[in-house]
Image (cartoon, rainbow, N blue to C red):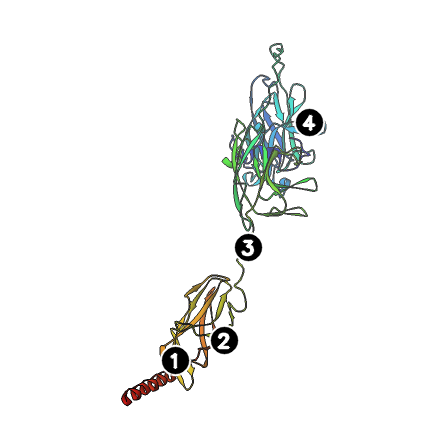
């Protein structure tokens, strides 16, 4: 438990609050001691070097004036190695301020001859060990230590046995399975599940990004997974496995740096607890991505939905049909034309049927035609007449009316009357000639 490392206090991370109100009732004395904080440890000497030792620890003088605004007091077996205070996390206990109204507590602390903090092993037969009380939630330092009590272990009753040399064991490689990793919510929170295996010690799980070679972490959503975790999501199992979850957003801020994971590549990463992450020290790192931005459909085109193409003077066909014009829709459209229109020929008006489709494809022009009645076609012979048809076009929910106009004409009728008169005259001449004979 190096006191200089960043993050939560080592004992708090290793045990969380699992040791809160731990073994041994917090039986405080009825009278409040005015003396400085002190520890009484029984037994404190001639401890068994080969087995765990149950120590009865009583603390007094840990009043509100001493603790101040801090949460409470940690108590654990400790040793000073160099300038670092190391502690046995397995022995640690936490006593909150509110549980010590008189400034006193009773607890049972387990002391072993050897303990490990981080990567350092301590032998209390070689290095002096103590029961230490310090302010929570911090790593122990000389400044925040409130009281200590020395411990002494008895000499081994048997000569030391040189353990056999064991072949080096290759530790398992930490592996983390992250799900989901793609198509995450680009506009809000996403919940990600992380399943790990092969982790040798406690770890952090966090949303990260590498900016200018530095690993930036989202501390607001990070998880501390360790042995002794209070909840299943904080617990590192004995076999190095865990299952936890993170709820992340597409952006996060760390210090003065804001990261947008929709622009910068982000990942769900793991690294050893009580250390600051670097690119090299990350155990695992799974890249994640967010859903693409949704592009709204283009708005309906402004202006006319359809255009009219005029035609030249149209000659009435054999079936009394003439083209009035063309209409082109910009998009697929519905067409509604009147069944008939009136056409003025000479001084009279005649009915003409309208011929037009009911639907039209985008960009495809369609014809608007009229068919005159026999009487109208006869009246049009040798003349011209103007035809106008109002066509309603509906596209993208918008309806507009297009006026299609054209001039139609018809050929002059053959002079059948003159031919009949000539034939009649010829017949009369033949009759007169026959009568003279």
Proximity of marks 1 and 2: CB atoms separated by less than 8 Å:
no
Between marks 1 and 4 in the image, the one whose residue lies nearer the viewer: 1
Q: Nearer the viewer, mark 4 or mark 2?
A: 2
Which type of secondary structure does the marked residue at label 4 adopt? strand
Near mark 1 (Cα within 10 A), the count class, few <14, some 14-19 or many ≥20, is some
* Residue 378 tag number: 1
The answer to whether residue 231 of the structure is visible from this angle is no
- Residue 154 pos. (x, y %): 62, 16
Q: Real-space Cα distance between discs 1 and 4? A: 123 Å
Q: Quadrant of the C terminus?
A: bottom left
Chain-order first, disc 4 or disc 2: 4
Q: Which residue lies under the disc numbered 4?
A: 80
| Whole-percent x, y for residue 186 in the image | 55, 49
| Of the two numbered discs 3 and 2 in the rendering, the one whose residue sits closer to the viewer | 2
SS state under label 1: helix
Query: Label for residue 295?
Result: 3
The mark nearer the N terminus, 3 or 2, is 3
Query: What is the secondary structure assignment of the residue under circle 2?
Result: loop
Select label 1 or label 3 by which is in front.
Answer: 1
Q: Position of residue 80 (x, y in %)?
A: 68, 27
Provide the secondary structure element on which disc 3 rests. Answer: loop
- Residue 52 picture location, percent across and down: 56, 21
Q: Earlier in the sequence, mark 1 or mark 4?
A: 4
In three-dimensional space, the C-alpha distance between marks 4 and 3, rounded to whole angstroms, equals 62 Å
Disc sitting over residue 313 in the figure: 2
Q: In front of the other: label 4 or label 3?
A: 3
Is 415 situated above or below 233? below
Question: Which residue is at a point 49% across and 68% down the rendered structure image?
Answer: 327
Q: Sort mark 3 into few (<14), some (14-19) or many (20+) by Cα contacts within 10 Å.
A: few
Q: Quadrant of residue 254?
A: top right
């Amino acid at each position: 438990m190096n006191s200089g490392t960043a993050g939560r206090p080592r004992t708090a991370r290793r045990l969380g609050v699992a040791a809160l109100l731990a073994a041994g009732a917090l039986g405080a004395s009825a009278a409040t001691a005015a003396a400085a904080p002190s520890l009484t440890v029984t037994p404190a000497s001639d401890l068994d070097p080969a087995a765990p030792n149950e120590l009865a620890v009583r603390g007094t003088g840990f009043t509100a004036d001493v603790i101040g605004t801090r949460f409470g007091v940690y108590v654990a077996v400790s040793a000073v190695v160099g300038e670092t205070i190391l502690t046995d996390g397995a022995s640690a206990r936490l006593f909150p301020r509110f549980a010590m109204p008189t400034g006193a507590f009773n607890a049972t602390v387990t002391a072993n001859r050897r303990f490990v903090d981080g990567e350092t092993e301590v032998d209390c037969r070689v290095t002096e060990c103590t029961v230490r009380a310090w302010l929570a939630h911090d790593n122990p330092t000389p400044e925040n230590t409130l009281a200590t009590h020395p411990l002494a272990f008895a000499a081994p009753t048997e000569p030391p046995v040189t353990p056999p040399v064991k072949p080096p064991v290759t530790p398992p490689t930490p592996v983390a399975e992250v799900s989901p990793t793609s198509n995450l919510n680009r506009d809000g929170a996403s919940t990600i599940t992380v399943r790990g295996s092969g982790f040798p010690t406690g770890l952090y799980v966090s949303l990260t990004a590498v900016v200018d070679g530095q690993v930036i972490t989202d501390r607001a959503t990070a998880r501390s997974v360790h042995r002794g975790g209070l909840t299943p999501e904080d617990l590192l199992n004995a076999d190095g496995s865990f299952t936890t979850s993170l709820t992340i957003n597409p952006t996060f801020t760390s210090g003065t740096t804001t990261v947008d994971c929709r622009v910068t590549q982000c990942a769900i990463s793991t690294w050893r607890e009580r250390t600051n992450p670097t690119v090299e020290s990350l155990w695992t790192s799974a890249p994640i991505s967010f859903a693409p931005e949704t592009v709204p459909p283009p708005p309906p085109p402004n202006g006319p939905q359809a255009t009219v193409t005029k035609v030249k003077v149209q000659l009435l066909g054999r079936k009394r049909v003439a083209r009035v014009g063309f209409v082109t829709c910009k998009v697929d459209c519905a067409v509604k034309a009147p069944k008939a229109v009136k056409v003025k020929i000479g001084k009279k008006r005649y009915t003409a049927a309208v011929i037009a489709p009911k639907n039209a494809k985008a960009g495809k022009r369609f014809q608007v035609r009229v068919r005159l009645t026999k009487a109208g076609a006869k009246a049009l012979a040798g003349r011209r007449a103007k035809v106008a048809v109002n066509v309603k076009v509906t596209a993208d929910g918008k309806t507009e009316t297009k006026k299609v106009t054209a001039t139609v004409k018809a050929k002059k009728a053959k002079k059948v009357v003159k031919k009949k008169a000539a034939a009649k005259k010829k017949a009369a001449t033949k009759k007169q000639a026959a009568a003279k004979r």
